[in-house]
Image (tube, rainbow, N blue to C red):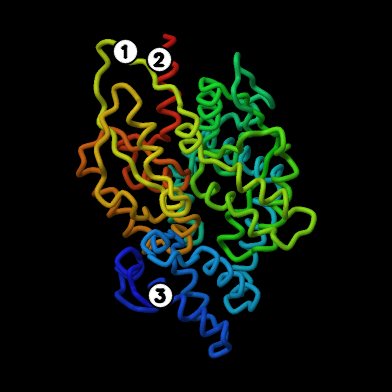
Amino acid sequence: MHCGMCLPSCPTYLETKRERNSPRGRIALMRSIADGDLEVTREFGEEMYYCLGCLACTTACPAGVNYPELFENARAEVEEAGVMDNPQRRFWRWLTLRQLFAKPWLLRLAGQGLRFYQASGLCWLVRKLKLTALLPKNLRELEPTTPTVRAQFSDALIHATEKTDNARYRVGMLTGCVQDLVFSDVNRDTVDVLLANGCTVITPREQGCCGSLHAHNGDLEQAKIQARRMLDQFDLEALDAVITNAAGCGSHLKHFGHLLADDPDYAEKAAAWDRKARDISEWLVEIGFRKPVSIAGESKTRCTYHEACHLCHGQGISAQPRAVLAAIPGLELTELKDATHCCGSAGIYNITQPEQAGKLQREKVENIEATGAELVATANPGCHLQIENGLGKRIPVRHPVSLLAEAYRAEES
C-alpha cells in the first residue's frame, strides 16, 4: 500500500514531515531490505527505533497492513545484524531483557530493593544531598520519574484461587511485571471486580513478563521463551478467559498464536490462548457487567479518558472502557482532544527517545488540562506513569477498573 492514509496519524511524521519517518516510508525501507536492494545498516536501525510502535497507522490503514508484525521483525533484523551494537547498549539489553524481565524472582528482588530505597528515606536523602549529580546524564534525568514500588506485590494481595457464590465463569488473572511491582493495587481491584461479576479467579503464583517488552525490542527468541512459560502456568481448558488489565501486555498476549506458530509443542495451545485472552474492560462488556448503584447526594467528578495506544490501536478496544466509566455513579466523562494520540511512553520510548517522548507528553498534558478534568483514566501502566509525571500529580490518574471497584465498595459502606 502506498496511499499515505497513515501519514496524518503518525507522531514522528507529523514532527519531521520526512517520508522516512512515516509508516509508509519505513515499510518501503523494510521491503527494500527484504528484496535485497538495501542492507541492514545502523541508519535503518535508528529509524526503526525512532518509531514509537504506537500502531496508530494500523487503525488508519484501509488495507489492514499488519504493521506490528513488520515492525517487530524489522527490529529483530536490526538486532541480529548487530548494527547498533556497542558495549553499553549490549549490557543494558542483557540486564533488562535477559535478566530482570526474564527472571521473575530477580525482578521482584530488584523491586524490593527499590522499595526499601524509597520507603526508608534514602531516596529523600540522596536527592537532598544532590548525590544524583554523580549519575550519568541519562540516568540523572530519569531518576525523578522513578515509579513508586508498592509495599506488597500481587501474590501477597491475591489468593491463587478466589471464589464467589453462584459463579458463572472461571477466569485466569495476569499480574504482569511492572503492573505487579507498581500497580499491584490495580490487580487487586481487577480481581474484586471479577468476583463482583460472577467470576471465579485463578491467579498463578510468581508470574513473569509476558514477553511484550522483548518482542517490542527485537528479541523475538526471548519473547517466545516468555510466551511458553506463560502458557505453562495456565490450565486453559479449565478457563473461560484469561484477563489482563495492561493494554501493552494485552496487545502482545493476543498474538501468541503467530509467535509460536512453528512450535509443534505449543502452537495449538497458543492459538487457544489467543481466543481466550481478554482485556478487563472487553470481558466486562462481553459478560454484561453489573452497574454500581448510585448513592444519594453523591457529588460529580469530571473525568477524562486517555486511550492507551495498544488498547485502541493494538486491540481495537475503545468503546468498552468508556462503557465502564459511564456506568460509574458520580463520574462525568469529558472527551479528551486527540485521546487516541500517543502520550510518549510507548514501552521504553521515553527512555530511549526522551526528546520526542517529552513533546508528546507535553501535548497530552495540555489537552488534559484543557478539559478541566479532576481525574484522568487510562488503562496501561506506561501511559499512567507518563501522564502522571507530566501532570506533576496535579490531577490524579486512575485505571477504569479501579474506579469501578471503588464504586462497588461504596455500595457496601
Q: Identify the mark nearer the N-term, 3 or 1.
A: 3
> Is tag 2's residue or tag 1's residue first in the polypeptide sequence?
1
Tell me the number on the disc at residue 410: 2
Across and down, in percent, residue 351 comes to 47, 59
Tag 3–tag 2 contact (CB < 8 Å): no
The residue carrying mark 3 is: 24
**Image spot of residue 127 (x, y percent):** 45, 44
In the rendered structure, find residue 356 and report the number of the disc placed on it: none
Q: Quadrant of the N terminus?
A: bottom left
* Mark 3 burial class by Cα count in 10 Å: few <14, some 14-19, many 20+: many
Q: Are marks 3 and 1 in contact (CB under 8 Å)?
A: no
At 47% across and 38% down in the image, what residue appears? Answer: 282
Helix, strand or loop at disc 1?
Answer: loop
Rendered location of residue 9, percent (x, y)? 33, 63
Query: Which residue is under mark 1?
Result: 295
Residue type at mark 3?
Arg
Q: Secondary structure at mark 2?
A: helix
Q: Is residue 150 above or below residue 274?
A: above
Q: In the image, what residue type sits under mark 2? A: Ala
Mark whose residue sits in front, 3 or 2? 3
